[in-house]
Amino acid sequence: MKKAPRRRPSKSAKKPKGHAHLLGVGLDNDDGHKRITQAEQFTILGGSEETHGRMTETVVKTFETLKQRGKHLQTVEPKELAEIIHKSTPR
């Protein structure tokens, strides 16, 4: 009796493996405030009020874009992630 060939799941159906986390560190803080913003898949530390806000906006937009594309941080290619982050950065 022959076994049916195993079907490979499509790449889009692939479940994320492992754990991934984005970390943003701002170094331009001189007002003494300790700024920390955390979520399940990112942490933003330090920076001036402006820098911290820009970094937070960038990662929020990055995750929105990943969701729109049906991708996960754990599985997106580094080059594509860098492109998304660049486009998500407020000007």
Image (cartoon, rainbow, N blue to C red):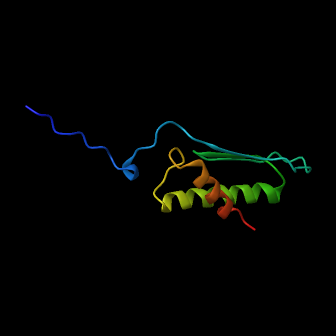
For the N terminus, give its image quadrant.
Answer: top left
What is the residue that sits farthest to the left in this orientation? 1
Q: Is residue 42 left or right of residue 47?
A: left
Q: Where is residue 63 shown, x and y percent of the image?
A: 57, 56
Query: How many labels were placed on the picture?
Result: 0
Relative vertical location of residue 75 with respect to residue 55 in this rendering, above or below: above
Identity of the residue drawn at 84% across and 54% down = 48
Q: Nearer the viewer, residue 7 or 22?
A: 7
Identity of the residue drawn at 31% across and 43% down = 8
What is the residue that sits farthest to the top in this orientation? 1
Among the 4 quarters of the image, the one containing residue 16: top left
Q: Nearer the viewer, residue 29 or 65?
A: 65
Q: Nearer the viewer, residue 6 or 55?
A: 6
Identity of the residue drawn at 53% across and 57% down = 66
Identity of the residue drawn at 63% across and 46% down = 42
What is the residue that sits farthest to the front in this orientation? 2
Q: Nearer the viewer, residue 49 or 79?
A: 79
Q: Is residue 36 left or right of residue 12?
A: right
Q: Is residue 32 left or right of residue 91?
A: right
For the C terminus, give its image quadrant.
Answer: bottom right
Q: Where is residue 46 shown, x and y percent of the image?
A: 80, 46
Relative vertical location of residue 31 with respect to residue 50 in this rendering, above or below: above
